[in-house]
Structures are given as C-alpha cells and as structure tokens.
Image (spheres, rainbow, N blue to C red):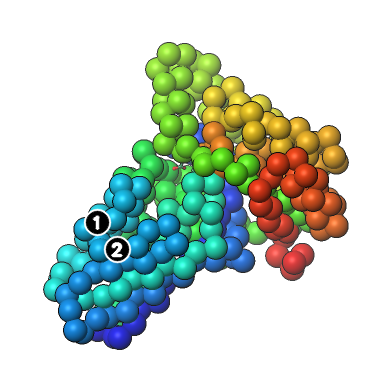
C-alpha cells in the first residue's frame, strides 16, 4: 500500500439518446476533459478513521449525507475488496463539476474514487472492473442507470453506447461547437426516469415508439458525425428534444434556454442528461458563434456556460 492514491475523471455530456438508452436504445456522449474531478486518498497510519472531504460534505464515512449513500456503499465495497477496513485514510474530492446538472457528477466521483483506491493499493484496474464498481454507486444514486455516465466520465473519447456494453469510441469529423448552459436548477434524474417508466405503463405503445424514434435519431446523428453536416445534426437534435418534451423530462427553464438559443442562430438545441432542471446545450457553427450564444444564454438566466468543440483539434 502506498502513502497516497490518486484517481481522476471528468464531466460528460450526452449528445443524444438520454432516457431511451435506459431501454436498450443507443446513445452518444462526449467527455468534457476540461471540467475535471480529482480524488486523493491519503493513508493515515496513526488511526483507522475514514474521513471524506468534498465541497458539499465533510465528515466520517459513516455520517455522510443521504445524497452520498451510493458513494458510501462504493467505498465500503472497495474497502472489503482490499481487505482494508482497518486501514485509516482521508479522501479528498476536488470537483469542477456542478452536481445534479446532468454532467455526470455522481459517476465521475465514483470513477475517480475507484481509481484512487486501486492506485493506493497498487492494483491494476481494467475497464470492466472500473465500470462494474462505479455501477455500485450509480445503482443507488440513480434508478436503473444505463451505465452511460460512468462509461463517458472515464473515457477520453466520444462514445457510442448501448446498455450492457462498455461503449465504443467514435471519431467525430463534424466541425461545430457546443455551448452547454446550466439552468441553475437541480436536475431530477431519478424522478425523470420514473416519469418515463410511468408513461410506459400508462401509454406503452406511444412511449415505445418515442423511445425507438430517439434510437433512430441517435443512429442518424452517428452517421452525420462521421461527415461534416452541422445543419443536419442541429435538425436531429431538435427532433430529439421534441421527443424528450413528450416523454415529460423537460421543463420550462430548459425550454426557455432552448428557445433563446434557437432564436439566436443555434443550429439545434436540446436538454442533456436526466432533464427536469440541469443543463441544455446548443450547437453553433463556429467557436465565435458559440461564445456569442453563451453570452446571450447568460443574459437569459443561465448560471454557467461551457464551450466544447465537437471535433478534436478544434479547441
Ligand atoms: C437519463 C439517463 O439516460 C442519463 C443521465 O445522465 C439515465 C441513464 O442513462 O442512466
């Protein structure tokens, strides 16, 4: 066992396919490498205490807030795995990710913690084990997670994802820039997932059609990403937003920013992640256009914006 274990991860953004991915349809998600999270696990040889420190909570592992029940379970699972229940440590989580905004904060935290434990105990970690362990946390924090968040917050490349698989890296040849904007309202992923489940129970036929349509739109987006047609991608994103609204996972704050973006030259705009609060994004043709849009979205209530070029090398 070393003196210190370090684990890193980053935010993610779902381009298309949220919610339908829970029901076996494909999704495409991108890493946001500049929005980072770091977990530092420092061994304490003087005591057997387990202290967790992060910007939203601080204290002993056993007294973490309810919102961290998934993290608590994950850490207990890791301690058991390494037979390290009697090893004292302090875990510091340093995160640039806003929590509950659809940017994968919980999965990114889990990924970094798993990496930090494997680093501290000097054990090699393969991707399958990493995702399986992150799922221990995600199962509690979200309901029926697809695994998409963990797969993307641990990947350096955009991924095409189907539930039950690890995600396939894809190359993007489309030159456009995304503006991500935070409504400032906590996203309610669990509730949004429940809302879709309820719709499936009350109106199975239409709901299944909508989920299948989102899957088809994702396939179309994948083809478009391999060539350079940002206008067509914008149209596909708008169609996906229509379906998400019908699935009852959007809300007025998201719709407002989406409309503002479309009225101000965005090629397309939609919510991203769980919805019902959280973030939306808009697609702009150029980096300059994206910066202008970011300013406009802020004037209309966005509390934070991030700019992310789609293709590598456009930074
Ligand atoms: C809403 C959802 O599709 C994305 C949450 O970021 C849920 C999931 O994939 O687990």
Question: Viewed as shown, does residue 63 lie left or right of 6?
Answer: left
Label 2, secondary structure: give it: strand
Q: Which residue is painted at 24% across and 69% down in the image? A: 50
Relative height, residue 235 to residue 178 (above, below):
above
Q: Which residue is painted at 85% across and 57% down in the image? A: 288
**Are the two marked residues, 1 and 2, in contact with CB atoms closer than 8 angstroms?**
yes
Q: Which image quarter is the C terminus in?
A: bottom right
Residue 129 coordinates in the image, percent (x, y)? 32, 62
For the residues labelled 1 and 2, the Cα–Cα distance comes to 6 Å
As drawn, the label of residue 63 is: 1
Label 1, secondary structure: give it: helix
Asked where in the image residue 177 lies, by quadrant, the reply is bottom right
Say few, some or many: other residues with alpha carbon within 10 Å of mark 1 (under 14 / 14 to 19 / 20 or more).
some
Say few, some or many: other residues with alpha carbon within 10 Å of mark 2 (under 14 / 14 to 19 / 20 or more).
some
Task: Say which of 311 and 193 sits in front.
Answer: 193
As drawn, the label of residue 271 is: none
As drawn, the label of residue 59 is: 2
Relative height, residue 49 to residue 183 (above, below):
below
Q: Is mark 1 within 8 Å of ligand 1?
A: no
Relative height, residue 304 to residue 253 (above, below):
below
């Amino acid at each position: 066992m070393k003196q210190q274990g370090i684990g890193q991860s980053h935010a993610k953004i779902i381009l298309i396919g949220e919610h339908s991915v829970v029901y076996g349809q494909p999704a495409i998600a991108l890493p946001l490498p500049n929005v980072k999270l770091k977990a530092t696990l420092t061994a304490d040889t003087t005591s057997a205490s387990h202290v967790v420190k992060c910007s939203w909570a601080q204290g002993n592992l056993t007294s973490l807030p309810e919102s961290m029940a998934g993290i608590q379970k994950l850490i207990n699972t890791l301690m058991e795995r390494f037979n390290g229940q009697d090893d004292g440590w302090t875990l510091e989580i340093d995160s640039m990710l806003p929590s509950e905004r659809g940017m994968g904060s919980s999965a990114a935290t889990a990924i970094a913690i798993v990496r930090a434990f494997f680093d501290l105990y000097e054990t090699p970690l393969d991707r399958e084990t990493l995702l399986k362990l992150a799922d221990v946390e995600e199962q509690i924090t979200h309901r029926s997670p697809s695994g998409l968040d963990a797969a993307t917050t641990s990947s350096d490349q955009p991924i095409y994802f189907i539930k039950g698989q690890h995600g396939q890296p894809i190359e993007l040849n489309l030159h456009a820039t995304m503006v991500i904007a935070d409504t400032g309202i906590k996203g309610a992923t669990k509730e949004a997932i429940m809302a879709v489940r309820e719709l499936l129970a009350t109106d199975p036929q239409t709901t299944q059609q909508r989920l299948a349509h989102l899957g088809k739109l994702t396939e179309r987006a994948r083809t478009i990403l391999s060539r350079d047609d940002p206008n067509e991608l914008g149209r596909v994103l708008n169609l996906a937003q229509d379906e998400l609204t019908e699935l009852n996972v959007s809300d007025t704050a998201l719709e407002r920013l989406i409309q503002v973006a479309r009225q101000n030259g965005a090629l397309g705009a939609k919510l991203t992640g769980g919805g019902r609060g959280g973030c939306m994004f808009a697609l702009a043709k150029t980096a300059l256009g994206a910066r202008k849009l970011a300013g406009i979205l802020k004037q209309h209530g966005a509390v934070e914006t991030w700019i992310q070029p789609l293709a590598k090398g456009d930074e």
